[in-house]
Amino acid sequence: MDVLVVGAGAIGGYYGGRLAQGGACVSVVARSDYAVVVREGIRIQSPAGDFHFRPDRVVREAEDLGRYPDVILVGLKVLEHIRPEELIRGAMGPKTSVLLIQNGVDVERPVAEAFPENEILSGLAFICVHRTAPGYVLHQDYGRLVLGRYPQGASSTAEKLAEIFRRAGVPCEVTASVVTARWQKLVWNAPFNPMSVLCGGASTAEMLGHEETENLVRAVMQEVCAVASAVGHALPDDVVDRMIADTRTMTPYKTSMLLDYEAGRPMEVEAILGNAVRIARRHGVQVPHMETLYALMCGISRK
Amino acid sequence: MDVLVVGAGAIGGYYGGRLAQGGACVSVVARSDYAVVVREGIRIQSPAGDFHFRPDRVVREAEDLGRYPDVILVGLKVLEHIRPEELIRGAMGPKTSVLLIQNGVDVERPVAEAFPENEILSGLAFICVHRTAPGYVLHQDYGRLVLGRYPQGASSTAEKLAEIFRRAGVPCEVTASVVTARWQKLVWNAPFNPMSVLCGGASTAEMLGHEETENLVRAVMQEVCAVASAVGHALPDDVVDRMIADTRTMTPYKTSMLLDYEAGRPMEVEAILGNAVRIARRHGVQVPHMETLYALMCGISRK
């Protein structure tokens, strides 16, 4: 399988490297990190064993690949100034599939609208991974992937990718309803990510350690369930209780949004909150707690 | 009029000093600032002219005054560990009135319950004033007072105090419905104070400069109006629009909560949000936006 990874950051570097380990031919579009990656590749430090990812080719722009890959893997953050549909255009052949491994809900739409004839795969990564320097990725924990065709259905490409990932030791599940899986992941992300920032740098344990903040976590989770249900992605009845219970058993954890905030990097406010709030409004679902978090995160993002 | 001021901070120093200027006999209970205040009094720097407040007596505890004053002025912040009813007990005679100049709603209850036979006056200060060092107070702007008998009604003491304040150049209005005035002030404080902190240090102009945050300001204001109405203090229909419009004309402004946060001082979260949220719950009024701000402020206060 011929794969082009767009973005040599944490997600692209880690999962691109795993696909190469699993036997795919993997090239990389690197921009700010081009010089290092073309010379050195990407070194991944991982509890499962460090490894060195040497891409088949490293290019500055997708079109420089000079051929149409089977799959373009997009591991970019979801930020307003990053337009994945523009970044991949130069390598999009008629049979190229796109795999978006990104956070949030409704993040596939720009790419799906730009390439209505192509297969879009959507992926959720349950992983702690960071780019520590150009060409260096630190994999801290976890790594499971959930993949599926967007907006739904079976995909032989997804099955093949899952096979390659599993060969490289990445637990990978293929789902026929990836959008439902996205809503389910948002049940966790929508409260914990913004609240960790807004509560002044709180860990998951601190947020669940006090009645007022735990109640807010639950209220936001219930709102996400209500929106998911309104758009045809009803989640299990016990999802909120189960996520709260699971989170209590986790090592106290800094969310990705908090890490971004502390490092002065832009945060994925629209993917995690804005898109869901807009979908709620379009469907007449009341989400006042989530709206409040969204407005405050818009405020803090501007500072 | 014989007045004892409890708390030699910004509010106590400024308004105590003005009462002395207006002709009252004013003593002060000072604790951490005792040594400076007993020796030097309190120096107030003000755009209306600097002045030097020499208290009649400076004591460490209310009971050290050795007599019952006509009025005890409490200018302390509303914080859990500060118990005004305990601090004033030693000077509370049968005819002593208490004037509480404090922020928030439902702040009079502990004192009113501890001294059911005494007259409680409640006061709202519209002022920018800070204690810059022991014995030093910086009056930056404004200064108007609204006073009234708690929970309602006429008071000849309030009229006399207003007379003395006015003699010293302090605009002072006496109201028969001071609790309504507190709710009205809360319409402004409940959104702007916490949001200025939660949005990462935003000024009033920044909060009103963007749709999402302006809408949140309005939503919280509407919730305060709904609670006020449920407890018999209906506010004018146009209060929200009027306050937004007035705030737009103000010089961009750092709220008192933001100043406290930036200085690492405790914030008046319960007076400004917690009390109102609990009253809303008791009366079955939905206040999800305010509840969200309250939970986040509880979280940030613990950090």
Image (spheres, coloured by chain):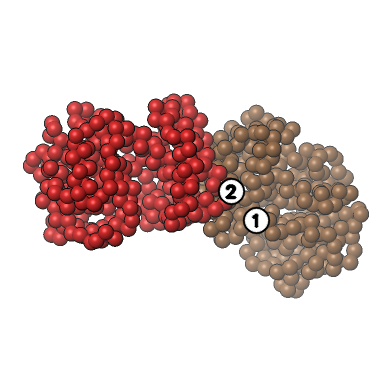
Chain colours: A brown, B red
Mark 1 belongs to which subunit?
A
Give me the residue at 72% from left, 45% from top.
A106
Q: Residue furthest right?
A: A94
From mark 1 to mark 2, how far is it between C-alphas?
Answer: 35 Å
Quarter of the image for the N terminus of chain B: give it.
top left
Quadrant of the rendered image containing residue B228: top left
Residue B215, how many percent across, how many down?
55, 44
Within 10 Å of disc 2 (Cα), the crowding (few <14, some 14-19, many 20+) is few
The residue closer to the viewer here, A92 or A12, is A92
Give me the residue at 29% from left, 32% from top.
B176
Quadrant of the rendered image containing residue B121: top left
Mark 2 belongs to which subunit?
B
Instruction: Read off the residue under disc 2.
Output: B211
Q: Amino acid at mark 1?
A: Val
Instruction: Read off the residue under disc 1.
Output: A129
SS under mark 1:
strand
Residue A123, how many percent across, how many down?
75, 47
Up-down relation of residue B77 to residue A221 (above or below): below
The residue closer to the viewer here, A246 or B278, is B278
Up-down relation of residue B51 to residue B148 (above or below): below
The residue closer to the viewer here, A225 or A159, is A225
Q: Is residue A296 left or right of residue A85?
A: left
- How many marks are shown on the rendered structure? 2
Give me the residue at 43% from left, 27% from top.
B230
Q: Amino acid at mark 2?
A: Glu
The residue closer to the viewer here, A246 or A292, is A292
SS under mark 2:
helix
Which of discs 1 and 2 lies nearer the camera? The answer is 2
